[in-house]
Amino acid sequence: MNLSADQIDWIRRILEKGGFREDAAAQMLAVEVSKSIDLWAADEADSRPFRQQHDALRQLLGFLNDLDPPIGQIRSRVKGLPYLSRYYLLRRARQRWPRLFNPTQSCNIALWADRASERSLVGRLRSLIGEGGVEVQGRLRQSDKQSASKVEPVIMGVARGSGLEGTQNGGRPKGSGEVMLITYLALDWLHTTGEKPIRGRSSGKPFGDLVHHVFSWVGKPNAEQALRRYWTLASAGKDS
């Protein structure tokens, strides 16, 4: 999405509200936001159901959490991830380790996974895929009674069975697209300012203002509700 001069000016004002007055910061955030909108739009139009993308990362995280992680299978599964899932991991990697994941080094998460040491592979991928955990109540299959609770990992803004994600036609969790867009914007904010977004659901906070504006640009209502869901998941996780 090519942002207009007025939209870039709004981004500049939002940054100034947060105490960031450098013109270079506004230009950088505008570029990052534009890319995030395009990525989100591609994700929304992806023919591969969200649950398949989520399951692929969830299963990979299960291998990573084994006492003796099967390195060969892990490398193979990274290569087999859906494109958008790999690109999502690359975006997170660029925020955490910009010297390792940048245009002059590795911009291919599958290529990196193939070459990384076992320790780096397991440690970094765990950090990239898992965004913390949410305690959920299990169910016994035959009796459908509640069983002991367990911690379900938050992946791509969704924790399976937490009740936070809802359902939609048995496929993409309801509202997950909006949460994912906010996740992208949070990464953009961190990359540009060096600071995590300040919690808030209204446009009174700088990051909340950015989300409200972007939602209006892409024709999505209920930014405040989506922010509430995002912050609920972020508070259960280790990072936002």
Image (cartoon, rainbow, N blue to C red):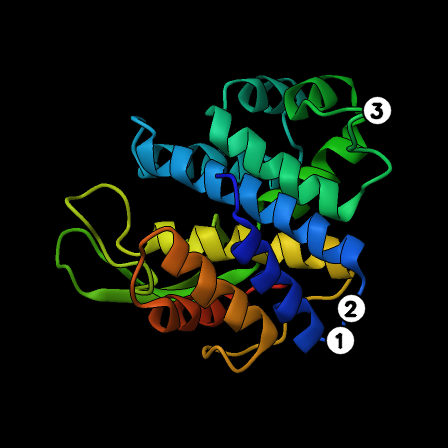
Say what secondary structure mark 3 lies in. Answer: loop
The residue lying toward the viewer, choosing from 20 and 172, is 20
- Residue at the farthest right position: 99
Q: Residue at x 60, y 74 (%)?
A: 206
What's the residue type where badge 1 is placed?
A: Gly
Residue receiving disc 2: 21
Label 1 or label 3, whichever comes before in sequence order: 1
x, y percentage for residue 98?
81, 41
Q: Residue at x 29, y 63 (%)?
A: 221
CA–CA distance in space, label 1 to label 2: 6 Å
What's the residue type where badge 2 is placed?
A: Arg
Say what secondary structure mark 1 lies in. Answer: loop
Classify 78 as above or below 97: above
- Left or right, 206 with respect to 166, comes to right
The label on residue 104 is 3
Label 2 or label 3, whichever comes before in sequence order: 2
Disc 1 + disc 2, Cβ < 8 Å: yes
Classify 119 as above or below 179: above
CA–CA distance in space, label 2 to label 3: 28 Å
- Residue at the farthest front position: 5
User: For the residue carrying disc 3, how many other residues have a C-alpha within 10 Å: few (<14), some (14-19), or many (20+)?
Assistant: few
Answer whether residue 44 is visible to the viewer in this image: yes
Q: Residue at x 13, y 52 (%)?
A: 142
What's the residue type where badge 3 is placed?
A: Thr
The label nearer to you, 1 versus 2, is 2
The label nearer to you, 1 versus 3, is 1
Residue receiving disc 1: 19
x, y percentage for residue 101?
78, 33
x, y percentage for residue 108?
68, 22
- Left or right, 238 with respect to 100, comes to left
The label nearer to you, 2 versus 3, is 2
